[in-house]
Amino acid sequence: MSNIVAIVGRPNVGKSTLYNRLIGERQAIIDDTSGVTRDRQYGLSHWNGKTFTVVDTGGFVQGSDDVFEAAIRSQVRIAIEEASVLVFMVDVTTGITDLDEEVASMLRRGDKEVFLVVNKVDNSQRQLEANEFWSMGFEQTFFLSSLTGSGTGDLLDAVTEQLQEEEPLESDLPKFAILGQPNVGKSSLVNALLGEDRNIVTDIAGTTRDSIHSKYTKFDKEFLIIDTAGIRKKSKVHENLEFYSVMRAIKAMEEADVCILMVDAQTGIEAQDMSIFRLAQRRNKGVVVLVNKWDLVEKETNTARDFEAQLREKLAPFRDVPIVFISALEKQRIFKAIESALEVYENRSRKIKTSDLNDLLLPIIDKVPPPTYRGKMVKIKYITQLPTYYPAFAFFCNHPKHVKENYRNFLENQLRKQFNFTGVPIGIFFRKK
């Protein structure tokens, strides 16, 4: 079960502002005209020791007001199905509207925990006015101002209490999630690997609706494939199928050890692919990038080497990722793709002996020490790998707070040079000796 917190409500009640507060960055574009939030609306939040994905449903609606209403209804339905917790947002300055009432009755019929959030409560007059919202009958009702942030802490405390600890998928086999935009060839890849029509492959975007677990056992290799609905582009396709598939992809990613991100050779890597790549990176998942439909690209103008160089530039600073050029339809290099994913899986569970770490890295650190801080020498005395599910290292030193980002990158590069961590994000922590 993946911990997804979905923010629902009609346009302009402040969903994006709250979303930004929760994920701690100004990721959304905030504007007063309804439907401007066009950014991909999902990000990570940490609170009270729990990590969860926040989805702002506002980013998935387009069109006129009546389209809005229909779209919002179907979103709320999807959110009730897919999210762990629902944050239902209303606006004290407009009072309770008909659409609010309608959303409320849908939420009451669902079986998920709902938190009613009355937004824009930023003075005593509005505090009084906000009381009318108790009539909506939600036990968990919070008054807050997402602009100033007052009240968000209490909301987060209550939300995280409802989140279950992750129940991992019961299997010791490597788990690979196949992610990417619609029609990039995810189903063709799964079928090519499994040698059977697991999914009916058609050209309609959004035909692979659900995530499917398939076990692969051939050529002495065993792993599970988590195949998902595509993460779709903004145009052409009905927006809510898009919303649905994004929810699915986030879930598949949670279960996976390695994310196989498929990119279309003809369009290159797009903003949406990058969002998924960054989310996988922040989730400390292994990553392999497959460039599919390479057989359709004009080779005179585009060499694989140029294409790969451009791709790595976009993925920076996490460039140490396997990139494999394939054709799922022609079954070209698909086994190379799987070998890369298995190798990344190995790299992600690699444990390095403390003595090896210190023997190899301390001399390098002596040669290139961290920059001094206000005339004080920063000395790293000792290194050890932390017992986490992905590679993470503690560097013990006298001034842990004063080691700069670029030196952290230097250490990461040294770790990658000395040991094979291709395709895996590395955690580096500085601790007081």
Image (cartoon, rainbow, N blue to C red):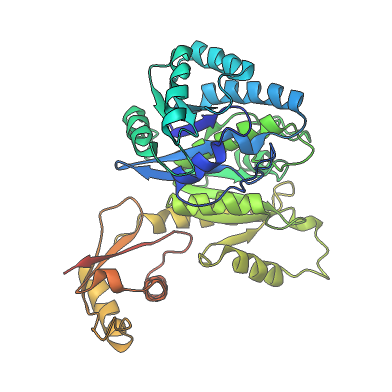
| Residue drawn at (60%, 54%) of the image | 274
Q: Where is residue 376 in the image (x, y as percent from the top left)?
A: 23, 83
| Residue drawn at (36%, 35%) of the image | 166
| Residue drawn at (47%, 27%) of the image | 118
Q: Where is residue 431 in the image (x, y as percent from the top left)?
A: 22, 65
> Is residue 215 visible in this depiction of the protein?
no
- Figure check: 104 above or below 151: above
Most foreground residue, 62 or 10: 10
Residue 328 appears left or right of 300: left
Q: In which quarter of the image is residue 148?
A: top left
Q: Quadrant of the C terminus?
A: bottom left
Q: Quadrant of residue 362?
A: bottom left
- Figure check: 382 above or below 244: below
Q: Where is residue 370 in the image (x, y as percent from the top left)?
A: 31, 81
Residue 283 appears left or right of 269: left
Most foreground residue, 410 or 286: 410
Q: In which quarter of the image is the N terminus?
A: top left
